[in-house]
Image (cartoon, grey):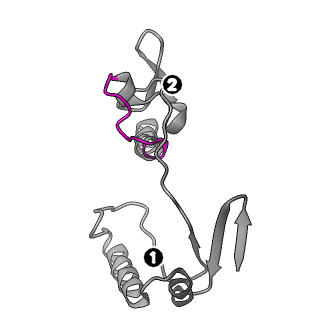
C-alpha cells in the first residue's frame, strides 16, 4: 500500500519479508538484525547503542518504510540556548522552565563564533530535544 503526503511517500507492509523485497534490502540480514534487537530488548539493553530505555520488540506488523534524505541546513538566528537547552534572556541568563531545540534555536556554533560547520536543524532537534526533555523532567 503506497500513500503520498506532499513529496513524502510512506510504504506499508504486513511483514518484514515484503518490506525487504520492496525496498531492496537483504532479507536474511534484516531478519538477523531484528532477531538480535529483539533479544537485546528482552535483556534490557541494546548491544549497539547501549540504550536501556524505550526498548520495544519488533515482532508484528504493520511495518512502514519511507525515503529520508538528510539535508544540511541551519538557521543562524533564533532563540539562544545554553548546553542544557534552556532558552536564554538577552542578559544571558536562563529562563526558568523554558527549553528549545531544533531550528527555532540559534545555532550554537555560530553563537560561539565557530561558523556553520555542517550542523543541521535535524541534529539540533535530535540532540537538544533529548537534552531539553531530560532537563525539563528534572
Residue at image point 43% right, 26% down:
81
- Is the C-beta separation of discs 1 and 2 under 8 Å? no
Q: Residues within 10 Å of mark 2 (few under 14, many from 20)?
A: some
Point out residue 17 in the picture as x, y percentages from the top left corner: 52, 90
Residue 105 picture location, percent across and down: 50, 30
Expressed as whole percent of the image width and height from the top left, the position of residue 87 reads 47, 24
Q: Earlier in the sequence, mark 1 or mark 2?
A: 1
Q: Secondary structure at mark 1?
A: loop
**Which numbered tag is attached to residue 77?**
2
Mark toward the viewer: 1 or 2: 2
Dot label at residue 15? none
Q: Residue at x 43, y 9 (%)?
A: 91
Q: CA distance from mark 1 to mark 2?
A: 40 Å
Q: Which residue is mark 1?
A: 57
* Helix, strand or loop: magenta stretch: loop
> Which residue is the extreme one toward the top?
91
Dot 1 crowding, Cα within 10 Å, few <14, some 14–19, many 20+: few
- Residue 118 appears in the figure: yes
Confirm whether the magenta stretch covers residue 73: no
Residue 62, relative to residue 127: is it above or below? below
Seen at 72% across and 58% down, the residue is 6
* Residue in front for this viewpoint, 68 or 124: 68
Helix, strand or loop status at disc 2:
loop
Q: Quadrant of residue 36?
A: bottom left
Give the magenta-colored segment's residue range: 112-123
Regarding residue 82, the answer to whether it shows in the image is: no
Rendered view: 5 above or below 130: below
Q: Nearer the viewer, residue 42 or 65?
A: 65
51 relative to 60 in the view: left or right:
left
Query: Quadrant where the C terminus lies?
Result: top left
Q: Nearer the viewer, residue 107 or 63?
A: 107
Q: Quadrant of the N terminus?
A: bottom right
Amino acid at each position: 500500500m503506497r500513500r503520498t503526503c506532499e513529496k513524502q511517500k510512506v510504504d506499508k507492509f504486513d511483514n518484514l519479508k515484503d518490506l525487504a523485497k520492496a525496498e531492496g534490502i537483504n532479507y536474511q540480514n534484516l531478519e538477523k538484525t531484528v532477531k538480535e534487537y529483539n533479544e537485546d530488548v528482552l535483556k534490557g539493553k541494546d548491544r549497539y547503542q547501549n540504550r536501556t530505555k524505550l526498548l520495544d520488540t519488533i515482532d508484528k506488523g504493520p511495518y512502514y518504510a519511507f525515503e529520508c534524505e538528510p539535508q544540511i541546513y541551519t538557521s543562524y538566528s533564533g532563540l539562544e540556548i545554553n548546553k542544557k537547552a534552556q532558552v536564554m534572556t538577552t542578559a544571558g541568563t536562563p529562563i526558568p522552565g523554558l527549553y528549545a531545540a531544533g531550528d527555532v534555536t540559534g545555532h550554537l556554533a555560530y553563537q560561539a563564533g565557530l561558523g556553520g560547520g555542517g550542523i543541521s536543524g535535524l541534529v539540533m532537534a535530535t540532540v537538544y530535544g533529548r537534552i531539553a526533555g531530560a532537563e525539563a523532567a528534572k
